Structure formats: structure tokens, C-alpha cells
Image (cartoon, rainbow, N blue to C red):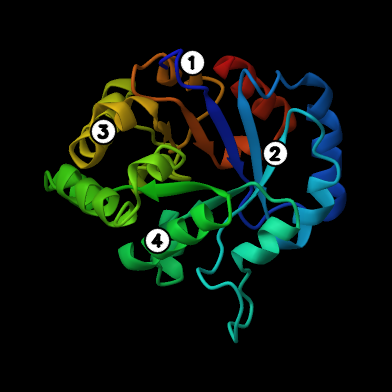
Amino acid sequence: MNKNRRPVIAGNWKMNKTRDEALQFIYTITPELPKNTDVETVICSSPVLLRCLVKRQGENLRIGAQTMHQSESGAFTGEVSPVILKNSGVEYVIIGHSERRAYFNETDETVNQKVLAALKHDIIAIACCGETLEERESNKTEDVIKRQVVAMMNTIPADAAKEVIIAYEPIWAIGTGKTATKEMAEETCGFVRNVIEQLYGKAVSDKIRILYGGSVTPANVSELLAQTNIDGALVGGASLDSENFLKLVKAAK
């Protein structure tokens, strides 16, 4: 991590936790969290739980959504708009997660539209990019990542671009128990930063936070966070256990 960039640990609960389970988790971790000025700690939950968790997030925890629609309102059954999220007190939203791309037809274009919508409504976007195992083994990682990053940042001005958080999540390492080595993760996160520098210049690339997401655990988080271009983690499975999640957050501090 670069000390000039505040680290972020964002837990993605995916389709897990009932209300009671979520509240027990929040009550357990809240007293132990470092100050928000030291580490941005975020939990991204089911939309059903968002308002409930926002009301109990405390001073050092923030609540995020796992996706949103790009429109402010409309006939989009089952979707949640940025207006609804903002009104509920939600401050973060994951956009373009690989599962959304794979199962729910998320595209580079819709990712860009959603990032723009999040910025418009002062919601911090955690915008995801990542390659499949086939793409990595075919030496297409950089081509895929560059395409995704350029697309997600399309028409976003430099001042706004600095507020976007980018999460590199190798698809082949999500939920598989596999993880990129610290060298692989650093190399690709460094490449993401280089793409941002090409788009906006060094002032923006030095400011933007880049997270690694792909089977991050208490066992490997410290070596990942020790890398220059990794500013935190987008965490799936390890964020479901309060003890493990606290270890990740404290490692970031």
C-alpha cells in the first residue's frame, strides 16, 4: 500500500446472511474496527438489509450495495436505483462484479453507465475488472483489463475519476480457493494504475485506490497489502465470518 492512499476493506456478502445474522455480525465487529480515517471498512449486503445496517453502522463502518440500476427510476422490476440507495444512506456500490457480468448480462457499457450514475449521486463506485482463466492462460490478461478499465471510465472527468475505486478480481480466483501470488496481483494492479495514468495522467493514477479481490484471507492479506499498487481488498467468503473480517481490516491498518 501507498501511505498516501487510505486503504479500503470491502466485504461482499453476496446472497448470504439473514437479518439476524447480519445484525449479529455488525454488533460483533463495530467495537473493534479501526477509525474510518485509517481504514475505510465497508460491508456490501443484500438490498433487503441495507437500511437496517445503515442505521447501525456506527462511526467506523460504511454500508454498500452489491449492484444498482443506472436509471433513477422506471419500469425495471427487481432493480434498485441510485436515488433509492442514496436516500437509504448507502455510500458505496459494487459495479460490474464478475458474477453480475456472467449471470446477469452486465457489459462494459452498462458498467460505465452505472459508474456515471453513482458519481452523479455521490455514491462511491467499487468498479470491478478481471480476466478468466482461459484469458490469462492465453496471455490476454492485459488486453481484457485495459478494455474493461477504459470502458468503465469512459467520459468520466479527471476530478471524478479520482473518487472511483477499482477492484481487480481475477475470475479464476473467486470462490475457488486459488489466489494470485502477491507478484501476480501486484503486476496486474500496477497495470490497472498504468492504464489510469494513460487516461488521466499521474496525478489521478497516484490518487485512485485499487483493490485486489480473489480468495483474500487472513493468511494472505498482509503480503497482498504490502504491495505498492494494492490499496485494499474486495473480500467474498472471508467477509462472512466476523473474526476473519476483523483480521483483514486490522491488517490494512
The reply to whether callout 1 and callout 4 are in contact (CB within 8 Å) is: no
Please say if 147 is above or below 246: below
Query: Which-is-in-front pick, marks 4 and 3?
Result: 4
- Of pointers 4 and 2, the one earlier in the residue sequence: 2
- Of pointers 3 and 2, the one earlier in the residue sequence: 2
Give the SS element for disc 2.
strand
Q: Residue 162 placed where, x, y %?
A: 41, 37
Q: Which amino acid type corresponds to the residue marked 2 in the rendered image? A: Arg
Q: Is there any visible trace of residue 22 in the rendered image?
A: yes
Disc 4 marks which residue? Answer: 111
Mark 3: few, some, or many residues within 10 Å (few <14, many ≥20)?
Answer: many
Disc 3 marks which residue? Answer: 188
Please say if 159 is above or below 5: below
- Of pointers 1 and 3, the one earlier in the residue sequence: 3
Rendered residue at 70%/18% (across/down): 34
Give the SS element for disc 4.
helix
- Of pointers 4 and 3, the one earlier in the residue sequence: 4
Rendered residue at 56%/42% (across/down): 236
Query: Which-is-in-front pick, marks 1 and 4?
Result: 4
What is the CA distance from the residue labelled 4 to the residue labelled 3?
20 Å
Q: Which amino acid type corresponds to the residue marked 4 in the rendered image? A: Val
Mark 1: few, some, or many residues within 10 Å (few <14, many ≥20)?
Answer: some
